[in-house]
Image (spheres, grey):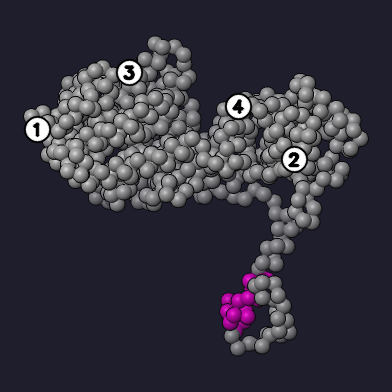
Amino acid sequence: MNKKEKATDLWVYDLLKEANISLDPQGSSIKEIDDALKTASKRGTGKVGFPEYVGIVRDFIIVIEDKSSLSMHEKRTDKDVLADDITSICDYAINGALFYGKHLIKHTSYTKVIAIGVSGNEKKHKISPIFINEREDYYELPEIETFISFNEDNIYEYYTKEILKENTNFEKETKEILKDAALLHEDLRNYGSIQDKDKPLIVSGILLALREIEHGNFSIDSLTGDSRKTDGQKIYDSIRDNLNRANVSPEVKRDKLLNQFSVIKDTTKINQIDPTLRKTPNRHYTEFLYKTIFQSIRFHQSGEDYLGRFYGEFMSYSGGDGQSLGIILTPRHITELFCDLLDLKPNDKVIDPCCGTAGFLIAAMHNMLQKTDDEFEKNNIRKNQLFGIEDQSYMFTIATTNMILRGDGKSNLENQDFLKQNPAKLQLKGCTVGMMNPPYSQGSKDNPNLYEISFTEHLLESVIEGARVAVIVPQSTMTGKTKYEKEIKENILKHHTLEGVITLNKNTFYGVGTNPCIAIFTAGIPHHKNKICKFINFEDDGYEVAKHIGLIETPSAKDKKQHLLDVWFDRTDAQTKFCVETTIEADDEWLHSFYYFNDEIPTDEDFRNTIADYITFEVNMITHGRGYLFGIEDDEEIDDDLLVDEDGDEHETE
């Protein structure tokens, strides 16, 4: 084995270790597999043969063959199938992996094998998985960057999505939530004529009231349409009881919340028996939420912001996605990505000064709780380490409710205008992490303080020195469109450090029409002129738009996210088409597209193809009377007897 191949083996070992997958090198500690390998010679001698790595994950055999050179990744026949002759099996990564996979399926009791061919090195490589079933049929799967999809936690999800092509439980759940949201929206409109901004208040208020069922203070059967004490009043009283039980304080904060929920008791129409429903709309909404949402939200412990998803659906159905208010709710996979990029620790204090429905704070809370087993520390996270500010009263109410429903953490939410807060005073909270999705498209020459970059600077000044800060903003924020924005960018670098910017999938905020990016800073430390920043193109993030659903996770999403984190934390190298590392100036456009250069040397074939494409284009222009583009007048005679059209067919000139 040469040095390059050994280096590839070690790199593959590191990938397996990172994914928490334990495979055996050059053999197997599992007797059944070891026995099968005794006759697995790639040369067909019937003697022993050893892949680079092999082992078991759940009920899958994983087998890996690697080669140091990209040119030895695969060999195909003239019919574009993987060649199975001895030379191809011995010399090429995928062909060898497929050979071992088929051999193990045939000579063991296992019925599922994932064979993986790897070639290249840390920076330039190809990783190609193949699934092989018990009939030795095989299916080539999309290339990957890491092995994260094949560990014990993820392999069944990968198998379900990528191989069986079925929806996972989460996708089924999402479809149901969207369907329920549509139905509830219609019912709120048809039976209550409820305004758009009041819809999520009714949803979240009823969910709080339902929490009182287990304490014997609320019953759906008690909602009888009594005119002396309306159903809305009964729900409102239970909301008050639950806020008291959740120890929402101070009293002025609790009163603010109750004032928002008064729509439930004060709206006459939803407290009268509807002739179609034969009950009050309030009871109908309560029954609906109990059956479809309450039980799920009560026992679901991921970072998913259910109320946020509901709110987003209500807004989209009503024809206003929140843009008029500057409200763009952050998707769950982005809130969780923030936690990973900022490497949250159990002792961090997190602030989101534009917290909306509290999606970032919920994700941060659950991320930190998962990193400690100490109950005192967990309680401290909930009570003293999460801070949120929200200007809109109804959004503040939803955020507080959401935090209560998702496991506390509501103690330090405030209904304030963030930009009017003294950053020096906010610094006293001691926040070590800042996360923000500020209002979009609110800034103008008349209101420059509402530019997204203004919110960013204000947040950087509101956390302690050395704090990690991430914001998700339109890409235009990083270019500096106006003189005011350019001045803020320059001022940010005088006092804070830009770590990098990640360009995101254009559909991240599906239906909103903004191209977002994530900017990451270290607060309170001036940006050094020699500081190397990372600019990453993460547009291909493994999420795509599904009809009637919106943005969904594809099987490659976990793999792509892991690769992003590996590059961000310097665990692996990447080509410049993915990541550019460079120093910056204040007047640069802080985006990957600004700094990108192609570091791949074109091959002779690339050169020939480019020249051929150009000649074909030029001739096509001439034949269509556009010769003037190349210095040939329309009436000039063309000497060629034959020309090639755009399909590659020869034809005579007229």
> Separation of disc 4 and disc 2 at Cα?
24 Å
What's the residue type where badge 3 is placed? Lys
Q: Which label sits in the foreground, 1 or 4?
A: 1
Check the image and report above or below for 39 versus 578: above
Q: Which residue is mark 1?
A: 227
- Residue 615 lies in what quarter of the image? bottom right
Check the image and report above or below for 539 versus 293: below
Q: Circle 1: is it few (<14), some (14-19), or many (20+) Cα within 10 Å?
A: few
First to last magenta residue range: 615-633
Of marks 1 and 4, which one's residue comes earlier in the chain? Answer: 4
Callouts 4 and 2 close, C-beta under 8 Å: no
Q: Which label sits in the foreground, 2 or 1?
A: 1
Of marks 2 and 1, which one's residue comes earlier in the chain? Answer: 2
Q: Which residue is mark 4?
A: 152
Q: Circle 4: is it few (<14), some (14-19), or many (20+) Cα within 10 Å?
A: some
* Image side of residue 316 versus residue 276, left or right: right
Q: Which label sits in the foreground, 4 or 2?
A: 2
Q: Which residue is mark 2?
A: 136
Q: Which label sits in the foreground, 3 or 2?
A: 2
> Separation of disc 4 and disc 3 at Cα?
34 Å
What's the residue type where badge 4 is placed? Glu
Q: What's the residue at 57%, 43% (across, down)?
A: 165
SS of the residue under disc 2: loop
SS of the residue under disc 4: loop
> Separation of disc 1 and disc 4 at Cα?
57 Å
Q: Which disc, if any, is residue 383? A: 3
